[in-house]
Amino acid sequence: MASGVKPRIKVPSSASAGETIIIKTLISHKMESGQRKDKDGKPIPRSIINRFTCEFNGQSVIDITMEPAISTNPYIQFEATVPEAGEFVFKWFDDDGSVYEESKTISVG
């Protein structure tokens, strides 16, 4: 597990049924591409968030594959339609096998 990794998510606390909302995520991660070398000339192992997913009540909202050119601390903004009250589950998958997970609930009113 990479050190200092911290996911942050911004989801409205409520929405109307059928409303499209904007979701913003950012994860603090160094994102090493595997192309650089350390002071001894040895390659620094690749360490990136290689996939991001979001589900709402068990249904996929977004599934992104990230490549080595992704920036440090990747920010992702996307829209989602909220058909009912429920829970968004966000997952970031790291090259080392770690999975960072956060969830946010939303009410419909």
Image (spheres, rainbow, N blue to C red):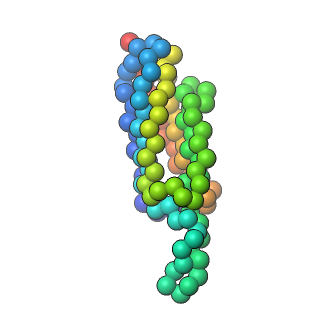
Q: Is residue 105 positioned above or below 65 on the image?
A: above
Residue at 56% over, 44% down: 52
Residue 36 visible in the picture: yes
Q: Viewer-proximal residue, 73 or 92?
A: 73
Residue at horizontal 47 percent and vertical 34 percent from the top? 78
Residue 108 in sight: no
Given the current orientation, which residue lies at the most extreme bottom position? 40
Residue 62: percent from left, percent from top: 57, 34
Position of residue 16 in the picture relative to residue 80 (left or right): left
Give the number of callouts: 0
- Seen at 54% across and 47% down, the residue is 92
Question: Residue 95 placed where, x, y %?
Answer: 61, 58
Give percent across and percent down for residue 107. 41, 19
Residue at screen point 54% across, 27% down: 56
The N terminus lies in quadrant: bottom right
In the picture, measured across the screen, residue 77 lies left or right of residue 95, that is left
Q: Position of residue 53 (x, y in %)?
A: 57, 40
The quadrant holding residue 55 is: top right
Looking at the image, residue 89 lies above or below residue 30? above
Q: Relative to 108, does residue 4 appear above or below in the rendering?
A: below
Say above or below: 23 vs 83: below
Check the picture and name the quadrant holding the C terminus: top left
- In the image, is 71 to the left or to the right of 45? left
